[in-house]
Image: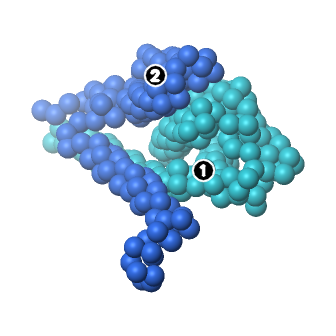
Amino acid sequence: MSEIANPPMSLDISNAEQAKDSKTLFGFWVYIMTDCVLFASLFATYAVLHHNTFGGPSGQTLFSLPNVLAETLILLTSSFTCGLGILSARARHKDKVIFWFLITLIMGIAFLFLELTEFRHLVVSGNSWHHSAFLSAFFTLVGTHGLHISVGLLWLAVLLGKIFGRGLSKNNLRQLTLFSIFWHFLDIIWIFIFTIVYLMGAVGK
Amino acid sequence: MSKEPSIIVAEHEASEGSFKSYLSGFVLSILLTLAAYLAVTHHSFTADRIVAVIVGLALCQFMVQMFFFLHLGKETKPRWKLFVLLFMIMIVLILVFGSIWIMNNLNYRMTPEQINTYMNNQGGGF
């Protein structure tokens, strides 16, 4: 009797765990969507203020497009390696997980380095957020994205440490999945920053 | 009889993307990014046309990444994630285009010349 009853019971547990996981994923998805609304308000602020340069240079002269293209490609590649990391995590290859997410981490740091270099360059040349409404809106929008990237990198570093020390567990797998959603989402936000702030700025619109 | 746990897990994993889907998402995204970049650096169109092209490319890339990286199309019914996404898009559109519309209108009415004309038309005061 118990031998017959056993398999369905273990099935129920796995179903219940999966239901719990999918609830967590959905909750995180809703958080991501509200974060999009935060970015939308910053985009709206930028769209309204980006002509108000207070006599200073506009985006057309300030932005260096090759630098921004490099940032975009780096972030895109890190999003891809993050996806490969998730695939290895599902296949339970611990070494591959560490390899792919380490690459994601390094690319994230490279992205942040390029962005901070750009910010430093702007501030040193006298175009900091004090100067005009355009620059305040620019630094707030791009800086908020950069802040999200920094938090994501910190989160990934902690996760990698846990996986390195204690191996892949079911909990780690769920957390890695949440992180990958967060990371892909930041890449999607960056597409719009790249297009609306940098490319449209270069066109002069 | 219900399915074996391993079958359920396999189905679950199939719904969350494969190497092929990540690779195609990656390649498509790179192509769309480079296309937008080249459209801007090669001044072959007018500014308005370039803006239309790059916004179109950005929307394409948004859909590519939603589909291949976040696996939105593979969600089973009820599609809660999709509904939350659509609601978010609605709020974002109202927020962004509403702000631009209102602020451009205010700006138009609040320039000094406009205020003078307005006040003169009103007979010298509000």
Residue found 84% across the figure and 51% down from its top: A126
Q: CA distance from mark 2 to mark 1?
A: 32 Å
In the picture, one chain is cyan; tell me its letter: A
Q: Amino acid at mark 1?
A: His
Residue B118 pos. (x, y %): 43, 71
Q: Quadrant of the C terminus of chain B?
A: bottom left
Q: Amino acid at mark 2?
A: Gly
For label 2, count other residues whose C-alpha is less than 10 Å away and answer few (under 14), some (14-19) or many (20+). Answer: many
Q: Quadrant of the N terminus of chain B?
A: top left
Tell me: residue B68, above or below residue A176. above
Left/right of residue A143 with respect to residue B85 in the rendered view: right
Residue found 53% across the figure and 65% down from its top: B113
Q: Chain of mark 1?
A: A
> Which quarter of the figure has residue A37?
bottom left
* Residue A151 visible within the image: no
In this view, the residue farthest toward the left is B1
Question: Which of the numbered marks, if any, corresponds to residue B124?
Answer: none
> Residue at label 2?
B25
